[in-house]
Image (spheres, rainbow, N blue to C red):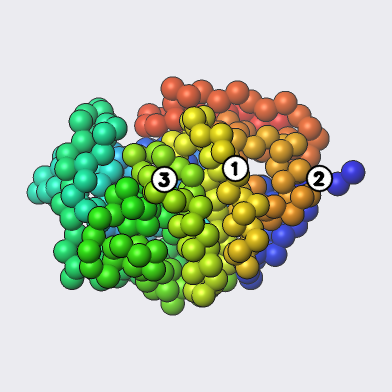
């Protein structure tokens, strides 16, 4: 019997060789200047047999950084570094999208230019700890609320990030609007207390995301842009008083700007990849009925669960995180139902090739 995960899928102009997606995974291994290097190119090239790679998030501005060693997409050196990555993937016949990111309040002054405060829709501090520029964890600071005239600058940063991604050779981009980062902070009323046109109503709280999607699709075209959402997420202290109503509205609004896919983080995992305490209803079948484009579902899937979700019609593609870290040849292993390498959690964030490019393949 054919595994649904191993069938081809047409995603916009791209014919994906299978429906296995490498989830965006922060690994904190960039060179100084937040520039991707040869080791990053090796890492992604090793995983090119998956149908689609979505890179770790790349900040669209220096202000958007929240973790040391994460790549950017706002300087010429970063663009040149990413060219090594896209070339490595394309040489092996793979497809790769860049995830565009601004962390908002999930940052620390030590990571900001001039030790500035992080920005957010409203001046509401997190309770969970944040990274410093040395990689240590510390108490969060209260962010500065963005002024109304600054928001158009944020939109332009996403547009410029998309232009840079196009120059770097990416096949498309994914807009990170999940896991408690800036666009998600605007969406959810636990973090957005604004009283201007970007706060209050569902339309207003969704406005920034829709402006960003519109700007990015003007660069890449609708058929090469995706959006990531986490409807039941609580990572980075994110919350909403009625998430079902909010994200149903967002899914319908996205139909009007028509990205090629939405990518849903399911409630069974947090934004950091850990098991979640939330065991409520899956968002995938609900939003599947609303959104008219393709749907990627992420959330602790194994091979059987991924195949079953596609067979039921709840999703078109399945994203894998930790299995993709530990198994560069995940597609090949799924094809013959081989055992998977165990992952080394201690090497997830920062470090060298250990736990990054040294996982064995079946052919090794």
Outermost residue, right side: 1
Relative depth, front residue between 227 and 240: 240
Q: Nearer the viewer, mark 2 or mark 1?
A: 1
- Residue shown at 65% from the left, 61% from the top: 289
Number of other residues with Cα within 10 Å of mark 3, as a class: few under 14, some 14 to 19, many 20 or more: many
Relative depth, front residue between 83 and 279: 279
Give the CA distance from mark 3 to mark 2.
30 Å
Give the CA distance from mark 2 to mark 1.
26 Å
Q: Which mark is residue 3?
A: 2
| 222 to 289, vertically: above or below | below
Regarding mark 2 in the picture, which secondary structure is present there? loop
| 289 to 41, vertically: above or below | below
Q: Which residue is mark 3?
A: 179
Q: Which residue is mark 1?
A: 281
Q: Position of residue 217 (x, y in %)?
A: 46, 73
- Residue shown at 42% from the left, 73% from the top: 214
């Amino acid at each position: 019997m054919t595994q649904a995960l191993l069938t081809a899928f047409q995603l916009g102009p791209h014919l994906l060789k299978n429906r296995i997606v490498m989830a965006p995974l922060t690994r904190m291994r960039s060179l100084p200047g937040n520039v991707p290097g040869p080791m990053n190119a090796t890492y992604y090239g090793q995983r090119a047999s998956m149908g689609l790679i979505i890179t770790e998030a790349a900040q669209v501005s220096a202000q958007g950084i929240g973790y040391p060693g994460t790549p950017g997409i706002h300087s010429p050196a970063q663009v040149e570094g990413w060219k090594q990555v896209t070339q490595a993937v394309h040489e092996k016949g793979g497809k790769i999208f860049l995830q565009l990111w601004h962390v908002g309040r999930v940052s620390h002054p030590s990571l900001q230019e001039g030790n500035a405060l992080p920005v957010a829709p409203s001046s509401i501090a997190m309770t969970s700890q944040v990274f410093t520029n040395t990689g240590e964890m510390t108490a969060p600071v209260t962010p500065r609320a963005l002024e109304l005239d600054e928001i158009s600058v944020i939109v332009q940063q996403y547009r410029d990030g998309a232009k840079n991604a196009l120059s770097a050779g990416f096949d498309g981009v994914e807009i990170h609007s999940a896991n408690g980062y800036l666009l998600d902070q605007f969406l959810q009323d636990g973090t957005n207390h604004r009283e201007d046109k970007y706060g209050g109503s569902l339309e207003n709280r969704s406005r920034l995301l829709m402006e960003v999607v519109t700007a990015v699709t003007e660069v890449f075209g609708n058929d090469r842009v995706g959006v990531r959402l986490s409807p039941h997420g609580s990572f980075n202290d994110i919350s909403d008083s009625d998430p079902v109503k909010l994200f149903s509205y967002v899914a319908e609004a996205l139909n009007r700007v028509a990205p090629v896919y939405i990518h849903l983080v399911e409630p069974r995992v947090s934004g950091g990849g850990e098991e979640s305490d939330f065991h409520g209803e899956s968002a995938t079948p609900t939003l599947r009925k609303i959104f008219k484009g393709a749907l990627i579902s992420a959330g602790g899937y194994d091979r059987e669960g991924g195949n079953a979700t596609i067979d039921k019609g709840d999703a078109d593609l399945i994203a894998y995180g930790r299995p993709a870290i530990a198994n560069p040849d995940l597609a090949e292993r799924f094809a013959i139902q081989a055992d998977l390498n165990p992952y080394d959690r201690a090497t997830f964030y920062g470090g060298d090739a250990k736990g990054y490019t040294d996982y064995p393949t079946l052919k090794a």
